[in-house]
Amino acid sequence: MDQNKFKYEPRFRNDVTSFLNVANLLIETEDSNLALEFLDKMLPSYWRDFTPTAITNLKNEIRKHKYTNADYATNEGDDIKSVEHCKNACEHLLRFKIIKEAIKQASPEVPHLIDFGPGDYTLPIGLNAENLPFTYDAIGLYNKAREAAKNILVSRWWEDQPVSRPTWFIAYEVIEHLENEWEIRQAMNRLETHPTRVFLSTPLYTYAEGNPDFRTKKIPHLRTYTPNEFVSICTRMFPEYTFGYITSEVQTLIGDLKNGS
């Protein structure tokens, strides 16, 4: 029998809508990378070779609306907010309150904060408004906000890592934005010395109502984290640190460098 003449005709139920519904729910709950994986790898075998147009179109929509580095480099949503807004955030947002209290407890030491993914620089501007003792540098993409923050922080902005004072490395609300989570570790590896402390955060599960209208809002969050998943990736990323876990709507990990690391 000549197998090359055989033509397969699918006889299974052609229920494309169910797959689209699952993928759309994953996008809405801010697991867009998982939605892509689902649509790439978890289709019936025939569809993996002959993908229905509706599924291909949704995959292209996801890829179209996911944030890129160019989007973050021109993101006016990260323009500097008022000093009062920043001070209020440092008083009420748990992850910022953790830094604030840690600075107070570190006295008389003056920590140098290196902020990976600073967003709108609310944290340092709020700390500065409270006249707390610290210096600061950031690793970010949006230069307009960076220059505005430097003008506010003035002498607190140190672009050279000090050797005589402790460095703290902060990556708040950034891991869920990265295609490669390990960019956080890569950024830390470029520092002159190991930070004595690291502070990491991400939303607990889906943040607020998620992203029900991704075609309008685009897709900044690529994945969500359960507590176990967040602890797992961070402890693998930073094995030299002993971590404590704190959670509310945003989950936060505080890592202290182990002796001898």
Image (cartoon, rainbow, N blue to C red):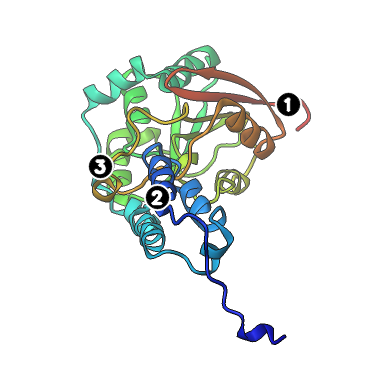
For the residue pair 26 and 144, the one nearer the viewer reads as 26
Q: Where is residue 188 shown, x and y percent of the image?
A: 59, 43
The residue that label 1 is drawn on is 258
Using a 10 Å C-alpha cutoff, classify the residue at mark 1 as few (fewer than 14 neighbours), some (14 to 19) or many (20 or more). Answer: few
Is 3 rendered above or below residue 23? below
Q: Earlier in the sequence, mark 3 or mark 1?
A: 3
Q: Where is residue 55 shown, x and y percent of the image?
A: 41, 59
Judged by depth in the image, the label closer to the viewer, 2 or 1, is 2
Q: Where is residue 196 shown, x and y percent of the image?
A: 63, 29
Would residue 164 be visible to someone looking at this image?
Answer: no
User: Disc 3 and disc 1: Cα gap in Å?
Assistant: 38 Å
The residue that label 2 is drawn on is 20
Would residue 134 be visible to someone looking at this image?
Answer: yes
Three-letter amino acid code at the position of disc 3? Gly
**Dot 3: element:** helix
Task: Report the residue at 59% width, 47% height from top.
Answer: 182
Three-letter amino acid code at the position of disc 1? Lys
Three-letter amino acid code at the position of disc 2? Leu
Task: Report the residue at 42% width, 64% height from top.
Answer: 52
Q: Earlier in the sequence, mark 2 or mark 1?
A: 2
User: Disc 2 and disc 1: Cα gap in Å?
Assistant: 47 Å
The residue that label 3 is drawn on is 77
- Counting labels gives 3
Tell whether 162 sits left or right of 55.
right
Is 25 rendered above or below residue 37? above
Where, by quadrant of the figure, is residue 151 drawn? top left
For the residue pair 4 and 114, the one nearer the viewer reads as 4
